[in-house]
Each structure stands twice: as C-alpha cells, then as structure tokens.
Image (cartoon, grey):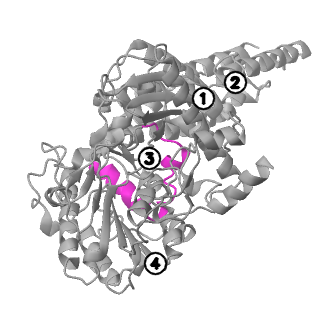
Amino acid sequence: MKNYLESIKLLIRRLLYLTVFYSICRILFVFFQYDSFEEINLINFIGGIRFDLSVIVYSNVLIILGHILPGRFKFDSKYQKLLKVLFFGFNIILLATNFVDFIYYDFTGIRSTFNLITAEGMEKEFSLLILNFLTQYWYVLTSFIIFGLLFWKWIPSHDYKNESQKESSKQWMFQSFVFVAMLIFFLVIARGGLQPKPIDRIDAVDYADEDQTAVVLNTPFCIMKTLFKKEKLPYLKYFDEDQLNSIYNPVKKYEFTEPFTKKNIVIIILESFGDENVSFSNPKIGNTPFLDSLITKSLYFPNGYANGRVSIDALPSILSGIPSIFGESYITSSYAFNNVESLPLILSGEGYETSFFHGAFNGSQNFDYYASIAGFDNYYGKNEYPYSGHYDGYCGIYDEDFFQFFSEKLDTMTPPFLSSIFTISSHIPFSIPEKYKGEFGSPKSEFYESVGYTDYSLKRFFESVKNKAWYNNTLFVITADHVSPLANQNNLPPLKNYLIPILFFDPSKMNHEINTKEMQQIDIMSSILNYLNYSKDFVSYGNSYQSPQSLIINLINEKYHCISDNCYFVFDGLQITELYDLSLDPKLERNLVKEKSQQLKELSDLIKAYLQSFHKNFKNDTLISSKLKLQSASSTN
C-alpha cells in the first residue's frame, strides 16, 4: 500500500518537474525573441502553466497510467527504469519543438502548428534544411543539448521497498478508488479546468494581448491542438440572401468603353521580400537598388499587405483572390479541390498560354499541385531545369540562373501569355553563389546578402528581356509572398507587420505613381483584370485598386484584423472588439468601440457578410460566377 502511494507521489513530482522545464522553455523563448514583444509580465508566465499542464497530461497518458494502475508490477526495478526512459523520450521530443520556435517564430509570427512543424510540402528539402538550420543556429542546438542533459540528470526517481504480502481486497479497492480519482483529476487538468470547452489556443488572450499570446502558449500544445484538426468552415447565418448580396457580393464585373487588352502578364513573387527589405521604403536596412529603380517607373502601392505569413498562403491569394482565413493553408485544406475562378483559368479562356515557375524541388510547398488545379498549362520546377551546376545544395536552383531560364521559356511562348515565377534564394538558408559573397554591400547578415542577390537576379532578368518583341506589350506585377523575420515590430499594429511591396510596371507607359490606397495580395487578380479591361463576371474576395471598395483582412491569432476606410478593427467571430481611426491614431491607442456606434454597425455588417459569403461559397463549392448566380437565383425563388 505504501509503495502505491509512493508511486503516486513520484508521478506528481515528475509532472511538476516537467512543468518547470516547460517554464524554462518559455523563458528561453522570450530571451531569443525579446524584441518581438512589447511588454512581458508575470501573468503571461502564470497563465502559460495552464497550457503547459494541459499538454503535459495529454502527452504523458501512458506514463500516468504506468504510475497509477493498481498492482505490484510497478515496483519492479526494470519496469521503473523503462518508465523513466519513456518519460524522458516522450517529453524531450516535445520540448525540442519549443527550441525550433526560438528561431522559426521570426518567420511565421506564431507558435508552430502541426503542418508547420512537419514542413508539409517541403519533404524533399527538409533533411538538407534541418542540417543547415542546426549549423547556422548552432547556439540553439547547443542550448538544447545542455537542456536535455540537465533534464535527464534531475528526473525524480525512487527506490521502492519490498512488500512481502500480497494486496488484500481492501487494498485493491482503495487503489482502484485512487486510480479513478486520479483519472478524473488529470482529465480536469488536461481540459484546462471545468469550463464548458477544453482550452484552445485562443484562450491565451486571457493572459496576454493577442499579439503576445506566443509567450503564454507553448509549441507542443499548438501542435497537439492542430494534429487532427480538419478545418470545417461553419455555415454562418447573419443575413438572408438578399441582405447578404446587398452588403457584400464576391462577383465582380467591370464596365469599360474600350475593348479587352491582350497584354502579356508576368507576375514575379519574391521570397520573403517584405517591405522592410525594400530600400525605397527603408533605406537603412533595405538592399534592393534595382527594385527601387523599377518603383520609380511603376504604379506602386506602399500600403501593400500579404494575406499570410508563410509561402504556401501566397499563391491562392495572388492568383485566385482567396484570403488565408481558413485557419490553415488553403492548398492543403479539404477545399483545395473546389472550382475557383483563378487568373490562369480566366485568361486561358481569352486565349492566353499560361505557365508557372518555381526553382525548388517539384512538390515543394505543393506549388506544382496548386498550379495544376489553378489551371496553369505548364509547371517548371527544379526537375524541368535543363542545366547543371546551378543547384544551391538546399532548396533548388539559384535565382539568377532560374530567372535566365524563365526568360528563355517566355521567349518560346505565344503571346498573349500569363506566366509567374516564385524565387527561392532569399529563403532560409539564404544560399547565394560563392562568387557573389560580399558583392551586395556590407554583409549585415546572410539574409541581407540574399536579398541583394535576388534583387541583382531580377535586374539580370530585365536586362535579358527588355529587347524582346513581347516586352513592351507586357504588364509586370512584382510582389512578395510574405514579410521577412525583420518585420516583427512590437510597436506597430499587427497588420503593419504584413506590409509587402506591390507594384505594376508597364514598359509601354513608364508612368510613376504612388498610390497610397491599402492593397493586398487578394486584390492583385482583380486589379490585373481591371487593367486589361476585362468585362466578364468573375469571383474574387479581393477588389481592384480602382474600386472604391476596400477591405484588408488577415486572420491573426484566431481573430480577424481588418482595415476599411481608414478604420482598423478586430472581429473575434462574434463582434468587433476593437476599432481605431488610423489617420488619427496610427499606434492603435484609443479604442473607439463605445464611441462610433454607426460606423461600428457598418463595419460589423461588412465583415459578417464577407465571412458568411466566404464560408457559404467554399462549403457549397460555388466559387464560379455562373454557379453562384444559379444558387442565388434558386434561393430567392
């Protein structure tokens, strides 16, 4: 009997011991990411223990059962050694994921989820990238090794005394009672308390501002909560069909007096080229002299926003007008097979030849898969690259060489054509050819140098195409997939950490215009079609830059952050909880929710209608304008 109680005590000691190490991970996370957070307080750490305990119980179910099951088998020395090894093995793997986020948080701005931590779509590159990661960030690896050794050294142990007599029926009943009581106790701990629903990531806002919830959370908890999670957009019913369409309708139709212009379209997506890297906007840290020169000849949007923080979110936004508000990446979601009116499909109907280029391994980020369902005629990745000696050793083909290949293939296409290229060299591990080391300014960092190299590669591309017959009849759209690690500034509104360059360069016009209107990736498709005088119906959740309507939207920490008519507002799924006037309050210091009732009502109706339309059309697979019109007609008859 005494040994059984000692086993319970040992379990409690081990779990509390593990909780301390989770808190140590939180302290180390704050140490590595200190500049990412404005204010860190004791409440963040105390609240974090609730999430630590939850994942500790879930992930140690076998260990818990091994300690609390009735019976004397638990007191065998070999069994105890096995239990200790399993306790160490299970938990050191989970604790290691926290160390990944010491660096990876710079790129994503969130604690890693299951899809991020497993590098879905990056399987071929993963082994090379992880080796480079461990080499480049050796100090994180060293910290983890020391952490792991200390964790093993101090795991609580206990030597059980021999008990000669067998348990009596009374003792068995007592142990069974304790067993059931402990199960109930640990169930409550795993749920995070007695509240109606188990705690989830969103509950971290109880202990920190939403842009600081990463301090409260831990990476194993975020992985656990997304491990088996299948996104299911709920049906929203804020408005009936007529009301819905009067407030928001994703069907776009532009009226023109001039005919459709069959200009070639070339879309260049620059890896991690957030606005913070563009020296036109940030001369102190930017490294883009050629891109700056293009800006002075282009229609440029300094208030351009990405619709996500990872590369896989960018393509559906840019090429299909689909915002990244599923809770996970659209490309890997169950809605990826939906029929969508993407830019390649629309322009193919107008006689365009279409192609997509990405210098990484085929299968990387599932871009080849997306290119196929989006309607591109041809996909060119590392597998299709015909030359040797240009592999960077990690991700794929160096940008300069792949840009030249891109140029060659464009020259073989029959105008009009739509083609897009996604660069790779400014992606971790920021590899550039040895001959260019030190050529792009003082090497402040490997990333800074890779930005300069990609900018140079862009220059070489334009030098190779400027004398081509098709060049002057081409609209070049240049943007980024997402911001870089440099974008995490805690003194800015959360959406301001999504700023990217968006520019339209038409060599036949060479007009320089800075348009200060808020623009986002999902607006690019509509803007291109508007630029071409496309007058047929199409579906997009973005707006043309010439449209008076504008709604910037991003899902950040389970809430919708939006900008419309110079108002910054936050919608939590039920109501607008924050409202600011950006023109008067750029740092979001005065919440106007209780002061602007009429404006609040209008914005609330807008975001609710937007989300209701989005959810409905994805669930019903009615993202084609003809289908949507048929459904609307049937619902009103």
Give the mark, 3 or 1, whose residue is nearer the N terminus: 1
Label 2 sits on residue: 197
Q: Amino acid at mark 3?
A: Asn
The answer to whether one can see residue 193 in this image is yes
How many residues crowd mark 1 within 10 Å: few (<14), some (14–19), many (20+)? some
Q: Nearer the viewer, mark 3 or mark 1?
A: 3
What is the C-alpha distance between the residues marked 2 and 4?
52 Å
What is the C-alpha distance between the residues marked 3 and 1?
23 Å
Say what secondary structure mark 1 lies in.
Answer: loop
Q: Amino acid at mark 2?
A: Lys
The answer to whether one can see residue 154 in this image is no
- The reply to whether the magenta stretch includes residue 534 is no
Label 3 sits on residue: 307
What is the C-alpha distance between the residues marked 4 and 1?
47 Å
Q: Nearer the viewer, mark 3 or mark 2?
A: 3
> Which residue appears farthest toward the right when viewing the image?
169
Q: Which mark is residue 200?
A: 1
Whether the residues at callouts 1 and 2 have beta carbons within 8 Å, the answer is yes
Q: Position of residue 193 (x, y in %)?
A: 66, 17
Q: Amino acid at mark 1?
A: Asp
